[in-house]
Image (cartoon, helix red, strand yellow):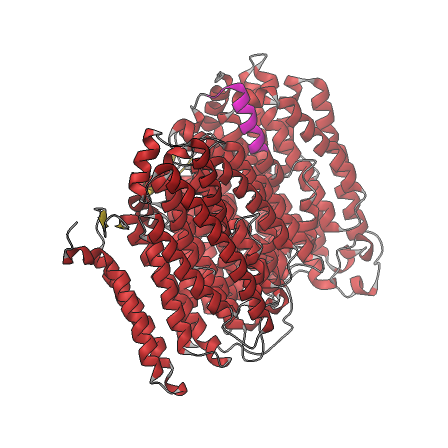
Amino acid sequence: MIADWPILSLTVWLPIVGGFMVLASGDREANATKWTALTIAILTFIVSLPLWFAFDSTTADMQFVERVPWIPGFNIEYYMGVDGISMPLIVLTTFITPLVVIAGWEVIQYRPSQYMAAFLIMEGVMVGVFSALDAMLFYVFWEAMLIPMFLIIGVWGGPNRVYATIKFFLYTFFGSVFMLVALIYMYFQSGSFDILGFHTLKLGLTEQILIFVAFLMAFAVKVPMWPVHTWLPDAHVEAPTGGSVILAAIMLKIGGYGFLRFSLPITPDASHSLDWLIISMSLIAVVYIGFVALIQQDMKKLIAYSSIAHMGFVTLGFFIVFMITQDNEGSGAVLGIEGGMVQMVSHGFISAAMFLCVGVLYDRLHSREINDYGGVVHTMPIFAGFMVFFAMANAGLPGTSGFVGEFMVILASFRADFWYAFLAATTLIIGAAYTLWMVKRVVFGDVASEGVASLQDMNRREFIVLGTLAVAVLLLGLWPAPLVEVMDASVNNLIQHIAVSKL
Amino acid sequence: MQFDATQLIPVLPEISLLTLACLVLVVDLFLRQEQRIISYIISQIGLLVIVAITLAVASPVTQIVFDGSYIRDPMSDVLKVGIYLVTFMTFLYAKDYLRERDLFKGEFYTLGLFAVLGMSIMTSANSFLTIYLGLELLALCLYALVAFNRDSAHGAEAAMKYFVLGALASGMLLYGISMIYGATGTLQFDELAKVVDKGDMNQIVMIFGIVFLVIGLSFKLGAVPFHMWVPDVYHGAPTAVVAFLGSAPKIAAFALAMRLLVDGLADLNGGWEGWQGMLIILAVLSMGVGNLVAIAQSNIKRMLAYSTISHVGFIMLGILAGTNEGYTAAMFYTLVYALMSAGAFGIIIALSRKGFEADNIDDLKGLNQRNPWFAGMMLLLMFSMAGVPPTVGFFAKLFVLDAVVSVDLTWLALVGVAFSIIGAFYYIRIVKLIYFDQPVDETPLSIGVDTQVMLSINGLSMLVLGLFPAGLLTICANAIGG
């Protein structure tokens, strides 16, 4: 039986070990190194496929479980497993990484082996975050993620990279150490670091609120939520294309995942009593950050702000639940969380694609300023088609994946309060405004400069990457049912769990 | 008590150390300068042999010999092995450095080995008298080693400061010891514990005694506000000496704290009135001052000096928890810290060459371009010091925090992590210099093969111990007992 194999361990350690191999092989045979890296990335994706196909979507129990003692003295275990919430995110991770490797193929000239190795190690560590069921294992992966990303931005980034990467590191480090103290505290309450054990742990309201705040610091920085989002635009602008893709497509999701795995089930009462805080932070992100995106001159910055706005939708969907369960309408609650999850996966595809589009332009003209472009469609028609398509998806056009998640969250918000839904729905207008306006200025119009006039259309490598993502966006947009089915049992279980007070 | 030759068995490591030191002293007299390597080889082989001897006489049973003044227990076994191995590493790192600067003299090894003997005695002391003797033996050797480059004005100044302040600290310690002796009538730790348990003593004298004891101890550990000597000594002494002085003696200092506070006075740790309260203040100050001032340093040796101070604060957190878990955590932390510190100075030594001391943090610029492998090692060491998983430094911090939370001092854990965030800044600044900046100095590194191997082991151990921390933790837990 395939489910008995240590698939999770393989998915975690194959890219990490492979990454070190790539690192050791050095830059003398740069081409061979790149092929090795690509092989490992694709192999990892193949290894992770059974997670999707052999997954039993009728149960909310953890599957593909692996459990061995790691540090017996503190009851810390190497305990991994997935449910419907974490599994799609793991497959998303293994799907995006090969694309990132391909995207960096010719662009990265400086120490390509270190670059590829960083992304492979990163991949393994991120899969580890999603699959860890021991809080300490989770924390180790969570923090270990910082090291490769710190180097990716700092070594291969833009001119202001050092500022951006140190800001990124300290922000996220600051956020997470308080979570560490909360985890240790719960260890002494429950006697182990088992996350599922934390779920059933009885906690008083004050304790819950303190723990919730500690978690919030960690996850809100990662998501990032307004007002702790300021590291993200800096990091995105300075990061190399591949770094931006991983950051937007996967690392941000880890914050959202944290809310579902930790905050909601461990501290349901605190989540309930502080839901107003998260909902208002989310709505501010959706509306205010949307307006901020509108005025950006730098394409990457614009997409970074649009990411913050879209992630606002995710947190809105997660916490609107508490407003709905008050009226005993369970299905609406399910819609909110599932909407948030779909939005996370969809944003993984779309933001990755948008950053890759900017990367395509940047590789040619070395500028991300919107004003330096104009009329790209005349010289790069195929690319223009892709960019317009992804922009539409980013704006939430029906038929693309961007629409599904947003629509579900807005529907759920309606069940809670008309005005929440109204504010959330403004994103359809603002989002369309900033994205399409950018596309209009970059892609359409007259050819703006000699640089644009000399542009070459996409090569085969870029076509493969963007084409794959376009298929994914369309597929998820037209037929989201499989994804929703996979997470259904787990989300229902979560809703039932948080409906019961721990007090 | 009758003298019995079997009493000498537990003391074998110290006896062999003394023999080794004397052997090196004598052999070295007959060597010409170009044969000096023989002293080095004898010392290193000797250290390894003594590790073997220590392991051979180790046992889970506690033995107290010499009329109760010497103790051999699992804790002393582990700490001694740690001291010898770390010394072995730092001697290895030091060799090329000393050679290139005409400092390659037999005295380095003689003094070094006598210092190790002092540490060994401290680790195994069971009475105030023994521990004081060990401490002074260590301190006197270190004073001389700091001034080892006698033509260096900085070195002489550092040694002078170290000597004056160290003598003051010893005075404090002795004063404290005399008061405790006056109050309880015993110098032996196990008997002291019994007296304290009965509560049959003058409380005021006792508290004064403990205060002076803790002051003396803080001087030796380098805890704020008794830390002034640390940066100057680290800055002034030859880097090879700092590598030694900054690593193995930390293990001995931990032993000193355990013997003084825990073996004899464990019952007096309670709350703010006991030594726990004093250590809380010292720990918070050390973490605060150490981490904040380190940010402002441009000299890497000074920066690491302040980083030591902050790490001492963390070690104190473990001790003040006053539980076996706390002592285990502190011991784990100390051993790991000694490794990290030796490694970091090893890298600095490797970057230096004849006529050039790499002691400015800018000298690390662009190391990744000059030598990616050792850049990676330094990366691991720095992230380990900052406490970022999956390096072992994280687990060291985690276990200490665990211990502190378990005795309901969660606020102290929060203070600890808050200062670690500040600390992370200057460690990642080093990583930034190594990876993101262009090298100022393109001279290729010439590192001996032995140093390369040892540095690699040292750096990779951060990762390996971080992935599998259970082994070392079990060793520490068994050593503390409980």
Is A179 displayed left or right of B106 in the figure?
Answer: right
Which residue is drawn at the image coordinates 74% and 50% (left, top)?
A299
Question: Residue A63's x, y, as percent?
Answer: 37, 35
Question: How many marks overall?
Answer: 0
Question: Is residue A242 among what the camera can see?
Answer: no
- Towards the viewer: B404 or A57: B404
Q: In the image, is residue B189 above or below residue A213?
A: below
- Towards the viewer: B49 or B426: B49
Which residue is drawn at the image coordinates 45% and 23% (left, top)?
A493
Quarter of image, res B182 = top left
Q: In the image, is residue A175 above or below residue B384?
A: above
Question: Residue A451's x, y, as percent?
Answer: 79, 64
Quarter of image, res B197 = top left
Is A39 displayed left or right of B360 in the figure?
Answer: left
Q: Which residues are magenta?
A: A203-216
Most distant residue in the top direction: A327
Question: Is residue A155 among what the camera can see?
Answer: yes
Q: In the image, is residue B480 above or below residue B112?
A: above
Is B2 displayed left or right of A454 in the figure?
Answer: left
- Towards the viewer: B458 or A124: B458
- Towards the viewer: B469 or B161: B161
- Look at the image and tell me in which quarter the N terminus of chain A lies: top left
Is A356 displayed left or right of B54 in the figure?
Answer: right
Which residue is drawn at the image coordinates 63% and 71% (left, top)?
B439
Question: Residue B132's x, y, as percent?
Answer: 38, 53
**Residue B404 lies within the magenta run:** no
Which residue is drawn at the image coordinates 41% and 47% (left, top)?
B257
Q: Main secondary structure of the magenta part?
A: helix
Question: Residue B287's x, y, as percent?
Answer: 56, 46
